[in-house]
Amino acid sequence: MSTRIRLAAVVTLSAAALFAAPARADGLHRFAVIVGNDTGGDGTRPLLYARADARKVYDILTRLGGVRADDAQLVLDGSAQDLLAALAATERRAADARTHGERTALIFYYSGHAKDGALRLGDTQLPLDSLKARIAGSPVDVRIAILDSCRSGELTRTKGSTKGARHAPAFQIQAEGPRDAKGLVILTSSSSDEDSQESDLVGGSYFSHHLASGLMGGADKSGDGRVTLFEAYAYAYDRTVADTAETAAGPQHPTFSYDLAGNGDLVLTDVAARREGVYLPREAPGGVYYLVDRQGFIAAEILKGEKDESDRRIAVPPGRYRVKRRLADRLRVGDIEVSAGQMITLEEGHLHDAAFSDDPVKGAMRVDVSRWSMGGGLGYQSVFDAPTRESLFPATGLVGLDLQLRNFFRRDWVWGLDASGGGASGVVVLQSTTAPFHFSELSLATSLVAEWPHGALTPFVGGRLAYLFMTRRFDGDAFPAQYFSTISPGIVGGVTWHLSRDFGVVLRGRVHYLLYNVDENRSLGFWELSTAVSYAL
Amino acid sequence: MRSEHVLLLVPVAALVFLLGACGDYSNEDLEFMNAVPQSSDLHADIPAVTSAVELADEAELAKQTHTVTTTFNGMADTLVTLVDTVRSYPPTSRTPDSRTWGPFGFDKTKLKNLDWQLRVIVSRDATVADRFDYEIDVHKDGNADTDWPTLVSGSFDAGHTARRGVGQLLLDTAKGRAEGLDVSDFGALDNLTIKYDTLDDPLTIDMTINDLPAAGSPDPGSMVVYSYSQAATGQGEMIFDLIGNLIAGPAIEDLRVTSQWLTTGAGRATVKVLSGDGVGATQTECWNASFVATYNNKPWSAGEDVPASPPADPGDLCPAISTP
């Protein structure tokens, strides 16, 4: 049960205002290199959400952070060389901007593995010292490095320097004009001896999740609609420590290092200028507000004080969300839909009470993360043995439909049901005559495959069990129709090319075992090749 | 994977494997089915009389040939119907060298032989390569399980060519009658033998019909022998002997009719008394494509001659037909 929140106030902006880059009002030409890599080579276990975190940060910086898409590089599952190449390309653009008299800023974000003093990007490594030196030497005025990886706090440890890592909120920033700011700021997700943790509930790492929530407005304590670097860090720090305090891995403490001439703060996102998302009036009850997306992930998590003196804006992207606020004895939940260019006011009256068992995040999470997809396509099937192919089971074109459920048994496992049918002509050569026939086949199958998402391409391999029903009818009814049915185990492999979030093209190969036992017991095999278009429901 | 899902999948997977493979999808079955003759194998083809021809105008021996051909095909169809089960249904059971259809009950709508069953067995002959033997056996309920007298037996030698092969079959109604089977549908038929060769040119079918003696008659039952051949060109020949007391008198006659035709329908026939009363007498008749007599030399009935005084050598009055 849910209550759809009516639009108490809808502000429609002009397209020009919508796509403006408000954060560039400070005069900084902003560039970004955003890196996400789930794999870290030998001795590491694949992460689940590093790439998702990178995508989320990329979206926020280009949508709210004044970074033009042209000036942002997103490197997913790339190597150290890819990272450095992206950095070099961005530096060239920044240097070009400086020659035109622009003040420039570089935001570097990394989510992935780090171990033994180096970033681990797949099978390649990039020493932290080297990275730090590289960023420090970038030809820009302001450099911001954000690392979300285990023991990333090593990057903020500076020998012999009084400017070192700090834990928020133990520092004060003198709010001088940001135009004066020059230098390097480093944010890390954990200290030098801590792991950085991921969460299935938030669909990302704790630190990046809270940093993102902060940048979307959660960190805007001042209520001016602009989230500064220090506001974002302080918010991410508080929420990360709070969330990880009770985890098995123990509390995780983000660190902060700054070396800014002028000590000026920087506005990272301008949620007021965007004027799109959810508007939380100052009189709204305090507590943590969760905005849960359609996949069941927490898109934004906002801590609102009981006595906030200003309204809050949460600049989530357009979409449908379920809002949840947790009370001591129950939940308050409701649905909202954010349209492009609209700011939806969230009123308490449109939430309703719900039991903890109806938590849209916990409990329902697994179901929501699991995702159905369906597809249809064409294929071709052929028995390996040539004589059998010529006279018994002719090679056949197939038309098929399939239904798949992802992440139900286990993340990146796909359980599938498929049906296909086809027909072909063949001829049986008997001792004294020939018997032309038409062959038909119906296949119903279930499969379980493992996927390895790799950018736009997702290879997969697994097992399949098919029920085959084959018939043939002879020309002129010279002989009675015949049928054969059997259970056929096999293996399946292929690759999905993701055209968009919902659509993909699947190229698939199958090899199956076929026990034929009418005339005699024969072990046969057949292969299939097919292509299909899939759509995520 | 969640443990409860694993526990569910294991019995499901075991069940589907136990179901195994099943069906009648078999090339070997086709070989066994193909051993029994089908209608086209045992069919005599002669150009039919068209509506443009008054039946009364049809030449006497052309009409006789049509009548005999109809009888011939009817008898052949009788046998084909008996073995047609093999070509209409998948076998009931299989061994590496045989297929069995049945046992089945007889057609209950005919209210005959309700306590009898029949089965068809086609087997690969172990002694002759590419030969199949087949039989239709009958069994009376209550008799010993091994008591399956054979009503129809046959064999087929596959030809390894596009044409079929060489075969023969015997319908032994006498045996069925002796076992107590009601074979009244076959009338006075005692046995019927067909031998066919569809492998070589010309195609040949020989049919021998033995009837029971007429009730109260001291004479043996009549026997009719048909020999049909057809060349690849389409021209055909039917030779049949009529054996019995066909002419008034004490002797048993054997009349041999040899009828030949072209694909156009034009043909000629001779009747010769081989034995019995009037032995040696010969009639020759020819007809055109409309089956109208063009020549008839019938020594024992000069009034039917065509023309009125037919020459000994018909010449152009008869079509030139070589023996197929």
Image: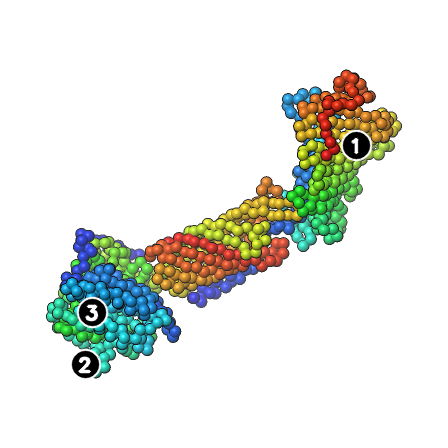
| Camera-nearest residue between A460 and A160 | A160
**Residue A210 location, quadrant:** bottom left
Q: Is residue B249 above or below residue A205?
A: above
| Residue at (70% x, 35% y) in the render | B230
Neighbor class of circle 1 (other Cα within 10 Å; few <14, some 14-19, many 20+) is many
What SS does tag 2 mark? loop
From the image, tell me which residue sits under label 3: A139
Q: Is residue A401 visible?
A: yes
**In whole angstroms, how far apart are the C-alphas of marks 1 and 3?**
118 Å
In this image, A301 relative to A439: left or right? left
Residue identifier under label 1: B241
**Mark 2 and mark 3, same subunit?**
yes
Q: Which residue is mark 2?
A: A162
Chain to which the residue tagged by mark 3 belongs = A
Quarter of the rendering occupied by the N terminus of chain A: bottom left
Element type at marker 3?
A: loop
Where is residue A20, by image quadrant? bottom left
Q: CA distance from mark 2 to mark 3?
A: 25 Å
Residue A262, numbered circle = none
